[in-house]
Amino acid sequence: VCGSVLSHIPGVGSSASPEHGKVLCVGLACLDSIHVVKTFPVEDTDVRCVSVRLQRGGNASNNCTVLSQLGAPCEFLGTLSKKQYLSVVVDDFKAYNICINNCIYYEACDAPMSVVIISQTTGSRTIIHSNKNLPELTLDDFKKLDMSQYSWIHFEGRNVEEVVSMIELVEFWNENHISEHDRGHGLGHKALPISIEIEKPRAEMQDLIPWADVLFIGKDFAEFCGCTNMSETLKKIAQDAKPNATIISAWGEQGAMARGHDGTVVQSPAFCPHKVLDTLGAGDTFCGAAIFGLSRGKSLQDSIILGCQIAGIKVGMDGFAGLD
Ligand code: ADP
Ligand code: FRU
């Protein structure tokens, strides 16, 4: 899946190689109904859109779309509805070569959906999400995994209590597999590094902070915590994170800043495309690309630069297709 858009960025787009275990992304897959408009509509008016498309979405699902195009074998784990739009979602996972072998299917529940309005003028995305009754993933679902298949486990910040118990399970596995799997990613001698993305501005997300080796803090959550910039975010989150955690803050057009496990701070500017067309999933793209870098042993600095470069390419095009 290596192609023209990525070919100028060294070390990405290499084909999936068997010596790398899969990156597992745990979280939401949903259907995005995307309506592109010239300018964002005024309330209570009747406007026409420029185009409409259905797209597989959800943070963990989008992370996989990016990881796979960069050349990382990856798996999505989450719940899926058999009642609605299953083939749209599943066929698209398959088209991107993303493993969904361990997903949990529900017959009678509705698929989570988002209506997304993208303004052509600014590239802004306005998301109206609904998740009526599809259950979240449970610890029992997670227990079925064979951990030896993976090289990295990433959790989307949601379903907090259950995710904490899943992480405890991975930690237990790590305690028994330390020496066999040291992959030299500079995150200590962990068999399976754990990353968590915290984006949603909700108080319960704070409970996830102490559990990650690598934390991705989105702008919305940072602002919810009272932070007004990236460096404040790193300092604030470090108070509750593991002492040697890597903390990464992404902030739209300001790019990203990160604090390594030894406290060193690095930064990357955003890479602005010729025209910003579609910012839906910019944060998911940044996160997927930075995980790709870290899991391949790149430095923290190079990994956040890669995250910003790939996110910059993404916001300059519609959707995610064509990163390859
Ligand atoms: P989200 O709101 O989707 O969580 P952000 O807006 O914080 O994510 O953006 C994540 C990353 O995407 C930024 O760090 C940046 O690298 C890139 N990005 C976002 N918006 C732009 C933009 N307008 N131009 C260039 N890069 C952008
Ligand atoms: C983008 C996204 C969309 C989805 C929404 C869910 O980050 O994952 O694809 O509709 O967020 O919150």
Image (cartoon, rainbow, N blue to C red):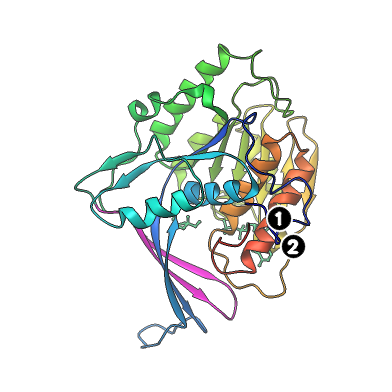
Query: In which quadrant of the rendered view does residue 71 lie?
Result: top right
Q: Residue at x 67, y 35 (%)?
A: 295
Label 2 crowd bin: few (<14), some (14–19), many (20+), radius 10 Å: many
92 in magenta: no
Disc 2 marks a residue whose amino acid type is Phe
Q: Residue at x 25, y 53 (%)?
A: 110
Q: Which residues are magenta?
A: 110-131
Q: Is residue 58 visible?
A: no
Circles 1 and 2 in contact, beta carbons < 8 Å: yes
Furthest toward the left, the residue is 108
Q: Which residue is mark 1?
A: 308
List x then y, in percent, for residue 35: 43, 74
SS type, badge 2: loop
Label 1 crowd bin: few (<14), some (14–19), many (20+), radius 10 Å: many
Ligand 1 within 8 Å of disc 2? The answer is yes
Please determine whether, in this image, residue 212 is positioned above or below residue 66: above
Please determine whether, in this image, residue 180 is positioned above or below residue 317: above
Ligand 1 within 8 Å of disc 1? The answer is yes
Disc 1 marks a residue whose amino acid type is Cys
Q: Which residue is mark 2?
A: 271
115 in magenta: yes
The residue closer to the viewer here, 184 or 47, is 184
List x then y, in percent, for residue 303: 73, 44
